[in-house]
Image (cartoon, helix red, strand yellow):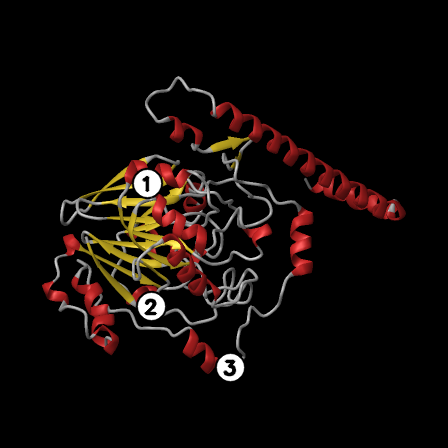
Amino acid sequence: MSRAFRLGLAWLRTSRQSVPIYCVGAIAGVTVYYLYNDQRIASRRQHLIKRRKEPQLNTTISHEQYKFSSLNIGGRFVNPFETWRDKTLWDFVRWLCTRTSGNGLPKDVLELDRTLPVATPHFSLLNALSRSANVRSHNEVGDSVEYAEYPDPSELDPRSTVTATWLGQSTCFVQMDGLNILTDPIFKRRTVFSWLGPERLRPVPCQLEDLPRPDIVLVSHNHFDHLDSDVVRQLGNSVTWYVPLGLRDWFARRGVYKVKELDWWQESEYTDADTGRDFRIISTPAQHWSGRNGLDSNSSLWTGFLVKGAHSSVFHCGDTGYCPAFKEIGAKYGPVSLAILPIGSYEPRWYMCHQHIDPDDAVRIHQDVRARCSIGVHWGTFMMSDEHYLAPPRDLATACAKYGVLDGLFVAPQFGKTRLYFS
């Protein structure tokens, strides 16, 4: 290696005038290779989608599940849906050049306090329904008066109670049948590092250590705003992580091995060691993509998760564009007690529609999976698209009226406020 390095330096000293030409040629060659490879994968994807429409011999799964099973071509996962379209570099440049600025964000922090208020989670309720009560949060943080109408936590039965506390983006702390669930955890001020990436509009309602200890963590995909490496280090092997295909090695490199890696339609059993209750964690299809840098694009899958207990079920959608797989999810696993659906990061539609649903699409998914109730997440946290920062809840109300969803069945929750449901 050192000899090759010395030879390289010697060549540079004697061929300085040729270096720019060689660099341009290398860049052009790499670009042509990637463009050719992308075109080859896209052509192969279309061919396999067409083949999947034909009758299949495997009768252990339905034809719809066969059509919507995961697809890997040349070591990269691709979307098996006709509703998907790959974005080109030109699409990205066009979006950047036509982006609107500001998202209507006020410069006055007091105005943000009014329009995007942050509540304190109902710690007494969360601790009462958890086996691992957090004494610190229970003693040091008083519950807000906005929970005055809630029933006495000591009178609630964990087996028939579902709570959902939205902490920003797609991070929720959910309790069902006595199980503590954390979804797509991120507690950072910025998405990538403390100094890099979009910044939160509002502070996190609480820190991870303020909550009861999660039993399981659901990670839909590896984008920075859905998977916080600091949380991975903090929780480590104290919880069971459920991740999509191809992501286990990322955790292993960080010393975390209590990881269940699931393919679409694959199920895993989780048994609560204290109560003996059994849960099914099911990986469900989604239309999105993955990657944390330019070199690992689509090397791991993206997924939704459905957690089914004896009395209730929770569907964590993750990021997705609208696709026909949601009707199959509802047909096979519905009805769902509570669905956690994204409603933000959807403008402009020509660029975002394949990877992010809008509130109209979210209401369609709410009906497709046969959800009794839904909460809209993935908005008002990190601004990474062009819609007004308050557009998601307004558009959600319009979509609910359009599709006849009754008031209160699908809401855009307040940051930090614990919502209570009964199965």
* Residue 349 as seen in the image, left or right of residue 13: left
- Residue at left offset 69%, top offset 59%: 97
Residue 416 image label: 2
The first of marks 1 and 3 along the sequence is: 3
From the image, tell me which residue sits under label 3: 108
User: Amino acid type of disc 1?
Assistant: Gly
Q: Within 10 angstroms of label 2, few (less than 14), some, or many (20 or more) residues? A: many
User: Amino acid type of disc 2?
Assistant: Gly
Q: Within 10 angstroms of label 3, few (less than 14), some, or many (20 or more) residues? A: few
Residue 7 lies, in percent from the top left, at: 78, 41
* Residue 293 as seen in the image, left or right of residue 204: right
Could you tell me if the residues under marks 1 and 3 are in contact, i.e. CB atoms within 8 Å? no
Residue 280 lies in quadrant: top left
* Residue 371 as seen in the image, left or right of residue 153: right
Quote the CA–CA distance across marks 1 and 2.
29 Å
Quote the CA–CA distance across marks 3 and 2.
21 Å
Could you tell me if the residues under marks 1 and 2 are in contact, i.e. CB atoms within 8 Å? no
Mark 2 lies on a secondary structure that is loop
Can residue 255 be seen here? The reply is no
Q: Nearer the viewer, residue 38 or 224?
A: 38
- Residue at left offset 52%, top offset 29%: 49
- Residue at left offset 53%, top offset 73%: 105
Residue 210 lies, in percent from the top left, at: 29, 67
Which is more foreground, mark 1 or mark 3? 1
Quote the CA–CA distance across marks 1 and 3.
43 Å
Residue 330 image label: 1
Q: Quadrant of the N terminus?
A: top right
